[in-house]
Amino acid sequence: MRFHTYTKFSPESADAVDLQSLLNNLADFLLQSGFAGGGQADPWGWGNVDQGGDRSLDALRQAILDALIQSGQFTPEMLEALRGDGDELSEAKLSKLLDDIVQRLMAEGFLKASAPPQAPAGHQPVVGPGGLAQAAAQDLRFDLTGKGIDFLGYKALRGILGGLGAATAGAHETAQLATGVESDAGSRPYAFGDALNLDVNETLRNAMLRTGSLEVPMDLDYGDLMVRQTDHRSSCATVLMLDCSHSMILYGEDRFTPAKKVALALTHLIRTQFPGDSIHVVLFHDRAEEIPIGALATAQVGPYHTNTAAGLKLARRLLGAQRKDMRQIVMITDGKPSALTMPDGEVYKNPNGFDPFVLQETLTEVAACRKAGIPVNTFMLARDRALVEFVKMVCGITRGRAYFTNTMTLGQFILMDFLKRKTSTVR
């Protein structure tokens, strides 16, 4: 006979929960894309946001409970022991436990809320469906902090690189990515302006050959100096264009949330490994706008068309202000151009097939990118024949690259493409 031993389970058990593991398991919930067009005001002026992206404390509690059970930190036996007979007291204990976990997430700086999760002074909490506590939990809004977003970016980066066979996200040498590998080229004489990365052995050898002496201190001359040749990491400015039209979340698949994770991972990689680089995020739909990285967690798709030309025009303007060795546009999309901003500011829309007018104006913007020396690397999440031909035209004009991928391999392709462009050997 199987026996179970239960220990006393109190709200203080929240202290034993691994917050980082829990936050990682909550990533999909915290970055959910939702769908614009509902009742919550949208900070970017898109109109309204549907409750599909529920950011209430009540939804957070349920997500935490599900994550704890799925990760094994909160077993069904422990849940049963805590709930007891399902009476009001047991429900109150469970609610207190989840509130304590939320408080810890906020105390550690991963989450922020519009108001402290506590009842008004002198109020007796009422739990259960329709209770005052439940209503308050639905009114309270939460969001990721900068620390939380940075942590999820780090976890996303580790997950992507782990899929490529790299053990960590640091600057370690790997056969797959080789982000910090020195070249095998030999040393060369120092020239004015070179980094003083001296090859000590060759420098001393030149001094000894010139003087024929081993006396210390050695007589070093300017011509004796030798510097090591290493892989040159050029600076790069990147604009990540994210399609947030309605097709990115319809048809039973959320394609926008994985794209947001890739953006966070790429941002973390650039900030930690290539601080001289820059990255901007542009959302394109009926129109286009730049958003800060911190706003990615709450960015949502909407009932919009795809104004690719507006996104390219904004990306080109942002890159024009960057003085980097390389500039590039990384475009993630799953659809054809179906909207265009007219000279008077109105948006022309035609979702039916490839509109020749929209296509021509979009390719005009692509040609402008080519003229500015900006390649457009396109990551297409669909494989319709017409879309394939469109992507080929874009890449042919700008000499960029095309990747036909899915949400599972999107991050690997983008990071590999970025890292390959970062290193070129100095001869």
Image (cartoon, grey):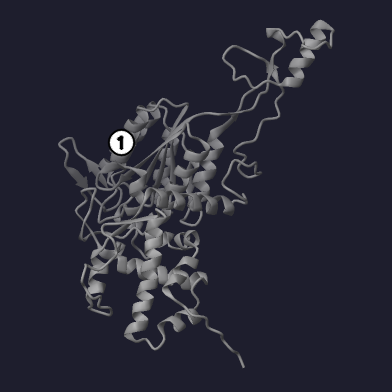
- Up-down: is 26 above or below 390? below
Task: Quarter of the image for the N terminus: give it.
Answer: bottom right
- Dot 1: few (<14), some (14–19), or many (≥20) neighbours within 10 Å? many
- Up-down: is 127 above or below 228? below
Q: Residue at x 41, y 49 (%)?
A: 147
Task: Look at the image and tell me whether residue 255 can be seen.
Answer: no
Where is residue 223 shown, x and y percent of the image? 70, 8
340 horizontally vs 18: left or right: left
Front-lying residue, 174 or 75: 75
Task: Quarter of the image for the C terminus: give it.
Answer: top right
Task: Look at the image and tell me whether residue 47 can be seen.
Answer: yes
Residue 93 appears in which quarter of the rendering? bottom left
Residue that lies at the very extreme toward the bottom in this rendered image? 1
Where is residue 253 shown, x and y percent of the image? 39, 62
Residue that lies at the very extreme toward the left in this rendered image? 344
216 horizontally vs 156: left or right: right
Residue 57 appears in which quarter of the rendering? bottom left
Residue 50 appears in which quarter of the rendering? bottom left
Where is residue 172 shown, x and y percent of the image? 63, 42
Front-lying residue, 186 or 56: 56
Three-letter code for the amino acid on which mark 1 is drawn: Leu
Q: Residue at x 31, y 60 (%)?
A: 34
Q: Residue at x 76, y 18 (%)?
A: 202
189 horizontally vs 309: left or right: right
Front-lying residue, 363 or 167: 167
Where is residue 201 shown, x and y percent of the image? 76, 21
- Up-down: is 264 above or below 364? below
Look at mark 1 in the image and give the residue it sits on. 314
Q: Residue at x 25, y 44 (%)?
A: 287
- Up-down: is 318 above or below 379? above
Local secondary structure at mark 1? helix
